[in-house]
Amino acid sequence: MSKTTTSDETATAPEEGDLGAAGSQLSTAPTETLANAPGLGVVGWARWFWRQLTSMRVALLLLLLVALGAIPGSLIPQTGQDATKVADFAKAHPTIAPVYEKLGLFHVYSSVWFSAVYILLFVSLIGCIVPRTWQFMGQLRTRPPGAPKRLTRLPAYTTWRTDAEPEQVREAALALLKKRRFRAHLAGDAVSAEKGYLREVGNLAFHIALIVMLVAFAWGQLFKAEGNKLLVEGSSGFSNTLIAYDDFKSGNLFGVDDLNPFSFTLDKFEGTYERTGPNRGTARTFQAAVTYSVGAYGKDKRDVIKVNHPLEIDDSKIYLTAHGYAPVITVRDGKGNVVFDDAVPLLPLDSNVTSSGVIRVLDGYRNARGVTEQLGISAFFLPTYTTGSETASTFPALDNPVLNLAPYHGDLGVDSGIPQSVYQMNKTNMKEFKDSKGAQLRENLKPGETMTLPNGAGSVTYEGTRQWANFQITQQPGSGWALGGAVAAIFGLAASLFIQRRRVWVRAVRGADGVTVVEMAGLGRSESAKLPEELGDLAGVLYDQAPGTPEHPDTPEPEVVPAEGAEK
């Protein structure tokens, strides 16, 4: 038996046609041909453009452009997300804002240029994948090609001589290769085998997953809906209708009829906080107990919504996003009639839930002279009041709640048609109530205490404190498909990177002296250090079944060494 290793001859590129089908490209990527420019014509140029568009390098370039286009969409305020921030940005940057508007940077994802890149990427991926898939399916239906005439020209090669019959060697090689999960068959005087088809499967799966992600993203943007609703404990609750939202935005193809029918109420909000240590004031428990029902006649069900643990109803998700306090206020006119009795949500100003807002009495109030007026009461709330810290709460829990009130009377301007913030008061047509010293009336109240308005104008009572929670209701179809596509893309990319597709041939023929000559060779899609190792392992197992001829007992077992310049 003799040992043959790859040498300068095996490292030399074979002449064209030497390897035949065995040396054909293992990838299913279409072979590009460049026609002569003068003879292209309209059809030729169209074909050339299509080939360029569906090439992998153009798909990667378009994918890069989509990623780059998403950067301004993340950094610059978007009209579809917050029109107020866009207006503030335009006011603060009067020079650059018109340029951004012309470039569509305030609505990136619906702009013409982003849509064009997005559609081109979609077409490119489909045009790239479809022909590759058909070619790959064709390769799966065909057998590995026969062995080339000169196996010595392949990157990994070994040979030895044995007394076993050629048929026995080929049968042993066929069984061995099939056991190692090669697709193998007899082709003349050699066994042809191929392995690593999952590499191309992973490659195709990766690109198909990208298409799924693109479709899911587009579908979700077109049919999405998102809104917010603030609920106070024990309030009437929320029904999933358009008019029930505090604010609402949706995709271009979303309709009101697409809203899922459900309703829910906030039964109780529970928030506990760290009392000591460096994390003092940090929330430990932050959850909302709700009662919900699905459909017009659905049964009531109870659940608890926590941060990052939304309530899911069909394809809608209800997230808990914020929390605050709502003092319960009772307002009486000069005759003692109750003209206002409700919990008023206040806006948190800091991490200790120092809050502010406005109590509005719009109808039913008459002053001491019987004249109809409107009341506006500025409210400043401290959940934990500490002497000497009148401007801020010292802890977010309701340890020592104090409500500071400053009442006004007059016209709040709500009938003018100009939108107003519910947390601020237009004082243009409002007058202050004065105390006995002529200063603005302002008092600190604890639960159960009452402020008496001067000159028999009535009274304001702080009854107690409820809690409120803000919920974000989202409806975005396609998110599950997007997640599935992302997972499939990761596994497909891993398969395309780590699985090596390779071919192995085992030739066994009787030599001129009657002794069987065994040749083994391997060919990989790319030069890989594992191919010589794998071929050496296969050769070692086959050598045990067809050992070297005893005429040359000093001949070592077959060893495969990579050609010069190959990876080691």
Image (cartoon, rainbow, N blue to C red):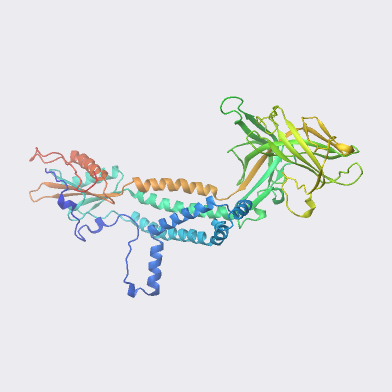
Q: Position of residue 487 (x, y in %)?
A: 46, 45
Q: Nearer the viewer, residue 451 or 228?
A: 451
Out of 62 and 337, give the one closest to the viewer: 337
Could you tell me if residue 334 is visible in this image?
yes
Residue 230: which quarter of the image?
top right
Provide residue 498's location: percent of width, then percent of height. Answer: 34, 45
- Picture quarter with the N terminus: top left
The answer to whether residue 228 is above or below residue 446 is: below
User: Does residue 299 appear in this view?
Assistant: no
**Quadrant of the rendering where the C terminus is positioned:** top left
**Which residue ends up furthest to the top in the rendered image?**
276
Q: Give the residue displayed 41% in from the left and 57% down from the top.
A: 61
Question: At 43% across and 46% down in the image, what residue appears?
Answer: 490
**At which x and y percent is residue 200?**
36, 51
Q: Nearer the viewer, residue 252 or 149?
A: 252
In the image, what residue occupies the spot 73% across and 52% down? 419
Judge from the rendering whether residue 533 lies leftward or rightward of residue 442; answer left or right: left
- Between 405 and 45, the one lying in front of the other is 405
Task: Specify whether 449 is left or right of 334.
Answer: left
Left or right? Give the position of 559 relative to 413.
left
Q: Is residue 463 left or right of residue 107?
A: right
Against 526, residue 397 (above or below) is above
Coordinates of residue 159 in the picture (x, y in percent)? 15, 46
